[in-house]
Amino acid sequence: MHKNLGNTIFMLLFISFDLCAWVKTTAHESIMKTEVLEFTVIAKGFSVKFPKIEYIDGYVVQNIKTSHEATLINAKKADKVTKVYSLTPDKDVVLPVFSIKVDGKIEKTKALLVKVKKRTQTQSSDYKLSMDINKKTPMVGEKMILHVRLVYKDLLDYTVFTPHFNDFSLKELSDKEYENDKGEWVEELAYEIIPKKVGTFILHPAKAAIELSVPKHKKRNIYSNALRLSVKAIPNNLSIIGDYELHASVNKTNVNKNKPVKLTLTLLGSGNINNFDDIKIEVPGATVYEKSTKHTNEKSFDIISDKNFTIPSVSLQYYDVKEQKAKEISTYAFAISVEDSKSEKTTKKENTLTMVEKIIYFIFGMLVTLFLVYMYKTLRNIKTTDKEKIIKKELQSIQSKEELLKKVVPYLGRDKRLDHLIYALENIENTNFKKLKKEIITYFYK
């Protein structure tokens, strides 16, 4: 019982309750042009079913968030469903009546009018948001510098939002904060901005959210001035604008058959070319392979052929911003000499030998072989003779039967005559030792 009482007290303290189900729509009374309008539809009940909302006055509607919260209706637990939607109107818009099915009944919200105001620069002596650009009559693809500056005296906090402009590409270059000569603080952002097509365009005001120190913690949105640009076409029907240098190089001009020659193209300068994707190389009589590189301003190719070929000149036409005229830049052409490999030359030479040459080569080979055999035998005989002289000298120096036996026993089994002399040496008397020794020495010397 105490547990149930505790749960009941908790629900009464922390969960909102109503006497019946209800629905409603909430939204700001007005927004600035180009801003996103967010509105909320809330329904409470035991069973809630929302309609599908896709369009309002022709504008696309997105459901960006849905949440559920426990609530009480007549002291019974119910569900509070909150859905947040968004759309981007460019004129006043009426949020219509929405029919929501709650507990089996259709409940309807009230219609709301939201005014869309034209953005104008916020005026204040304590802060100012401004926007300027270095050129207001650019050509398509021409790079410009856009600055957004927030100047203020005393703010607790602020956020300068990145602007967005249709038909322009935008890239942040820098973000710095400093104090100017008037003692004011400046937040300055620089962007590279490039127009994508011809026409007259309005760059809508930039936006910042600030938190004031007086009155304390008051927050508000402020806006900059707008900019009007007139974008012109590039003369001579060109699509590339800037200031460039184009260079080409090869790693060799003489190459073996079916071995690659590497061609490297390098583009220097600045303009609306971001990479080399549109540049292709065609070489008559050769195969071209494009290779990947580490740098976006380089392009590399391997070119292979089995005969001489020429790498043609590569050209680039563009409008030079500095000189205000159309220009064409070109690389050199390269003549490549293709040669047979060494193995192929040797094979061809072998195949052209005459019969006489083959006979001469054969006879020469035989003579070389006979000479080598003769030299082998001669050297072998010289070696044997030297060995015999050494053995004879050693045997002559021996003075006893025992020492002579030690020297000649290893030669047993090589010759029957020598074996007989060795056996005789073993049993001979010392008086006949010298005679037998002489016979043994004569055997080794023969």
Image (spheres, helix red, strand yellow):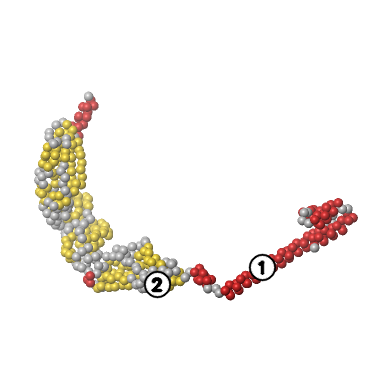
Lower position in the chain sequence, tag 2 or tag 1? 2
Nearer the observer, 183 or 246: 246
Number of numbered discs present? 2
Q: Residue at x 25, y 70 (%)?
A: 319
Measured as percent of width and height from the top left, residue 422 is found at 82, 54
Measured as percent of width and height from the top left, residue 38 is found at 16, 48
Nearer the observer, 17 or 221: 17
Q: Quadrant of residue 183?
A: bottom left
Gap in Å between the C-alphas at discs 2 and 1? 52 Å
Outermost residue toward the right in this view: 431
Q: Residue at x 20, y 60 (%)?
A: 167
The reply to whether callout 2 and callout 1 are in contact (CB within 8 Å) is no
**Up/down of 390 relative to 68, above or below:** below
Q: Say if residue 124 shows up in the picture.
A: no
Residue at numbered disc 2: 309
Residue at numbered disc 1: 372
Crowding near pointer 1: few (<14 within 10 Å), some, many (20+)? few
Q: Say if residue 290 shows up in the picture.
A: yes
Q: Quadrant of the N terminus?
A: top left
**Up/down of 53 relative to 153, above or below:** above
Outermost residue toward the front in this view: 355
